[in-house]
Image: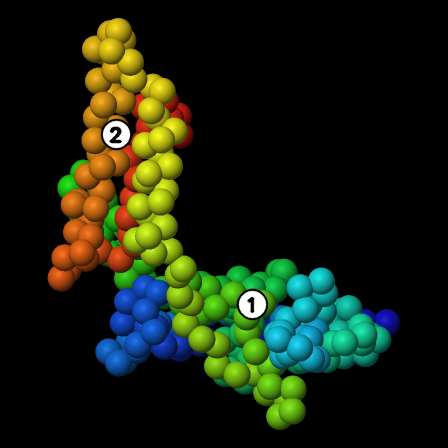
């Protein structure tokens, strides 16, 4: 029979990269998070293969109330403990964000950038889950029984993807304009399609100060319902 969960409050200072989705932290920036949640947590990680040491996605995390330390091991898995009293474990705990836990980031601030008619807003100091890889990508060193420091989160969004999506939007709106349309109906679509064509210019594609692809925003189609 399980024992009640012990809830603790812990403060975590963690490194953040120089910029969102960056890999360098040479600026020495840090952020502070407060974790309120279970003092111990057990997760199951794969024992072999390409996912060795990574969390098994089919298994839920377990607390003391779930007998996390004692339940039978699933085949092909290793039990990995997360201890909120250990800094590397606490970092992974914040990424895992177990049920019943809360993680609050201090002194974030917001950065606002304007490109043409587009406004891009993002946190100046990133939350833990914005900064580091997802819980499924955290790695447990099975041989040494320790959690490794998680890697910074990156984005796979590229300018090639932006252009591909832009071209798809243009193709999808081809049939929205015809010569015999009233100007009041046609004009918004003409404006929208021109805005799509202008995206590389507005976001400085190919220039020395090219805007990262993850910041690129698309115009709303005239028939989009914005809530």
- Residue at 36% from the left image edge and 42% from the top image edge: 165
Question: Where residue 81 appears, x then y in whole percent?
Answer: 66, 80
Q: Which residue is label 2 attached to?
A: 193
**Which of the image's four quarters has the N terminus?**
bottom right
Percent from the top left, x then y, of residue 44?
70, 73
Q: Quadrant of residue 15?
A: bottom left
Where 161 falls versus 188 (above or below)? below
Quick one: 94 or 212, which is closer to the camera?
212
The residue that appears at 13% across and 62% down in the rendered structure is: 208
Mark 2, secondary structure of its residue: helix
Q: Is residue 107 visible?
A: no
Examine the rendering and report whether any part of residue 153 can be seen.
yes
Query: Is 180 on the left-hand or right-hand side of 156?
Result: left
Residue lying furthest bottom: 144
**Label 2 crowd (10 A; few <14 / some 14-19 / many >=20):** some
Q: Position of residue 18 (x, y in %)?
A: 27, 72
Q: Secondary structure at mark 1?
A: helix
- Residue 155's label in the rendered image is none
Q: Within 10 angstroms of label 1, few (less than 14), some, or many (20 or more) residues? A: some
Classify 8 as above or below 165. Answer: below
Residue 147 image offset from top left, x and y in percent: 57, 83
Q: Quadrant of residue 65?
A: bottom right
Colour theme: rainbow
What residue appears at the point 56 percent right and 64 percent down from the top-left corner? Answer: 97
Q: Is residue 5 above or below residue 118?
A: below
In which quadrant will I find the C terminus? top left
Answer with the quarter of the image where residue 217 lies. Answer: top left
Q: Nearer the viewer, residue 203 or 86?
A: 203
Q: Which residue is mark 1?
A: 135
């Amino acid at each position: 029979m399980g024992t009640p969960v012990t809830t603790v409050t812990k403060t975590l200072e963690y490194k953040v990269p120089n910029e969102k989705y960056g890999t360098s932290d040479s600026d020495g920036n840090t952020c502070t998070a407060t974790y309120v949640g279970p003092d111990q947590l057990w997760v199951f990680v794969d024992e072999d293969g390409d996912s060795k040491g990574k969390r098994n996605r089919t298994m839920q995390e377990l607390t003391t109330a779930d007998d996390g330390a004692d339940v039978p091991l699933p085949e092909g898995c290793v039990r990995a403990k997360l201890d909120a009293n250990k800094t590397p474990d606490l970092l992974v705990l914040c990424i895992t964000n177990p049920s019943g836990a809360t993680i609050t980031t201090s002194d974030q601030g917001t950065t606002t950038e304007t490109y043409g008619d587009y406004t891009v807003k993002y946190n100046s100091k990133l939350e833990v889950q914005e900064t580091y890889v997802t819980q499924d990508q955290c790695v447990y060193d099975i041989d040494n029984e320790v959690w490794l420091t998680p890697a910074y989160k990156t984005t796979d969004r590229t300018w090639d993807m932006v252009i591909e999506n832009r071209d798809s939007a243009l193709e999808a709106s081809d049939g929205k304009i015809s010569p015999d349309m009233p100007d009041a109906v046609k004009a918004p679509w003409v404006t929208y399609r021109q805005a799509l064509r202008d995206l590389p210019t507005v976001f400085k594609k190919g220039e020395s100060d090219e805007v990262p692809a993850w910041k690129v925003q698309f115009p709303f189609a005239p028939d989009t319902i914005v809530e």
